[in-house]
Amino acid sequence: MNKIIIRSEQAKDIAEISEVIRLAFLNSEYSSHTEQFIVNSLRQNDVLTLSLVAEIDHILVGHIAISPVQLSTHELGWYGFGPVSILPKMQKQGIGSQLILSALEILKDLKAKGCVLLGDPNYYHRFGFKSYAELILKDVPAQYFQAISFNKNIPQAIVTYHSAFNATE
């Protein structure tokens, strides 16, 4: 496999990003199949803090979206990963790991306090994410809602994602 380039999205990438996201979740049984609409809505609402793409030979093969989340404590500086999308034929080649690690480093540079996500604990544990009883996403099994703190403090709070996560088209 040729070198993977991780970079910020450009306006010319938007349609291709949507297609990468759609294909990445096409056969996922735990998907609402609206992930591409969510990213577009985050972008339209100007709350897409980070939108990174993975590119190989000028072809987009992956994407990660990062947006702010609200905590019931009103503490600022927390963000949510999602979705993380890799073209099916390119999965399990380390592309997602590179996107995640790049996004975490950028969040640290932005002085973020922490990041949350909804996903497979067996996968995200390797990046330092884990479930915390004091950090809650309503109506989600606790083991799948995970966080990483950049300052070692985990707030006792209920987390809410932006309303863009309700987008269906």
Image: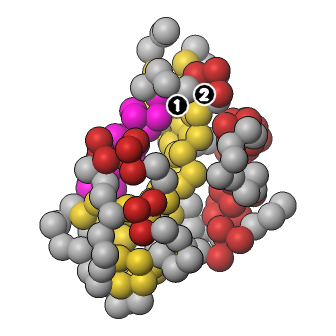
Q: Is 75 above or below relative to 127?
A: below
* Image color mode: secondary structure
Please indicate whether residue 54 sits to the left or right of residue 112 in the image.
right
Which image quadrant for residue 133? bottom left
**Crowdedness near tag 2: few (<14), some (14–19) or many (≥20) residues, C-alpha within 10 Å:** many
Which residue is the site of mark 2? 61
Percent x, y for residue 49? Answer: 49, 60
Instruction: State the extent of the magenta-drawn residues as a range.
Output: 95-110
Q: Is 69 above or below relative to 71?
A: above
Q: Nearer the viewer, residue 108 or 73?
A: 73
Going by the numbered disc 1, the residue's amino acid type is Ala
Percent x, y for residue 124? Answer: 37, 46
Which residue is the site of mark 1? 54
Which residue is situated farthest in the right direction here?
169
**Crowdedness near tag 1: few (<14), some (14–19) or many (≥20) residues, C-alpha within 10 Å:** many
Mark 1 vs 2: CB contact within 8 A: yes
Q: Residue at x 49, y 68 (%)?
A: 141
Q: Is 103 above or below relative to 32?
A: above
Please indicate whether residue 30 sits to the left or right of residue 19 in the image.
left
Which image quadrant for residue 167? bottom right
Please indicate whether residue 167 sits to the left or right of residue 94 in the image.
right
1 is within the stretch colored magenta: no
Q: Secondary structure at mark 1?
A: strand
Going by the numbered disc 2, the residue's amino acid type is Val
Looking at the image, is mark 1 or mark 2 earlier in the sequence? Answer: 1
Q: Secondary structure at mark 2?
A: strand
Considering the image in quadrants, where does the C terminus appear? bottom right
Percent x, y for residue 125? Answer: 31, 47
100 is within the stretch colored magenta: yes
